[in-house]
Image (spheres, rainbow, N blue to C red):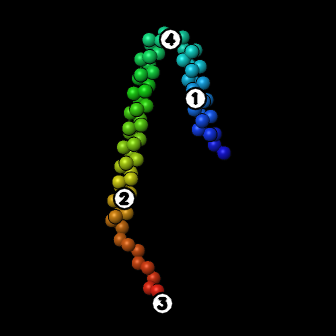
């Protein structure tokens, strides 16, 4: 069984906090680094959404182009 999402989030938050605390970077530097990271995450999210939409529309187009299957005549 996979870990529950709530546990994954909790572990991620703890690990992230630990890395930030151990970095020794000043808060004003961390602020810009985290902003850059967020921008990258948003780009990945948008790219993923665009890819999903493209795949969906392609599958819908392929389904529309396929001829209907013939059913066996009923007796």
Question: Can you name the residue that lies furthest to the front here?
Answer: 6
Q: In this view, does 30 lie above or below 43?
A: above
Secondary structure at numbered mark 3: loop
Q: Using the image, tell me which numbered label, if any, was put on residue 3.
A: none
Q: Distance between the residues labelled 4 and 2?
A: 50 Å
Residue position marked by numbered label 2 in the rendering = 60
Tell me where residue 42 sits by quadrant: top left
Residue position marked by numbered label 4 in the rendering = 25
Q: Distance between the residues labelled 3 and 4?
A: 80 Å
- Mark 2–mark 3 CB contact (< 8 Å): no
- Mark 1–mark 4 CB contact (< 8 Å): no
Report x, y in % for residue 71.
43, 79
Q: State which tag comes first along the sequence, 1 or 4.
A: 1
Q: How far apart are marks 2 and 3 (CA)?
A: 34 Å
Which is closer to the viewer, label 1 or label 4? 1
At 44% from the left and 11% from the top, the residue drawn is 28
Q: State which tag comes first along the sequence, 2 or 3.
A: 2
- Mark 3–mark 4 CB contact (< 8 Å): no
Secondary structure at numbered mark 2: helix
Secondary structure at numbered mark 4: loop
Residue position marked by numbered label 3 in the rendering = 75
Tell me where residue 10 sits by quadrant: top right
Question: Can you name the residue that lies furthest to the bottom here?
Answer: 75
């Amino acid at each position: 069984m996979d870990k529950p999402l709530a546990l994954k989030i909790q572990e991620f938050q703890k690990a992230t906090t630990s890395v930030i605390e151990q970095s020794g970077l000043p808060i004003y530097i961390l602020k810009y680094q985290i902003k850059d990271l967020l921008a990258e995450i948003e780009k990945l999210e948008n790219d993923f959404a665009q890819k999903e939409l493209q795949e969906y529309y392609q599958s819908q187009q392929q389904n529309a182009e396929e001829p209907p299957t013939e059913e066996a005549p009923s007796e």
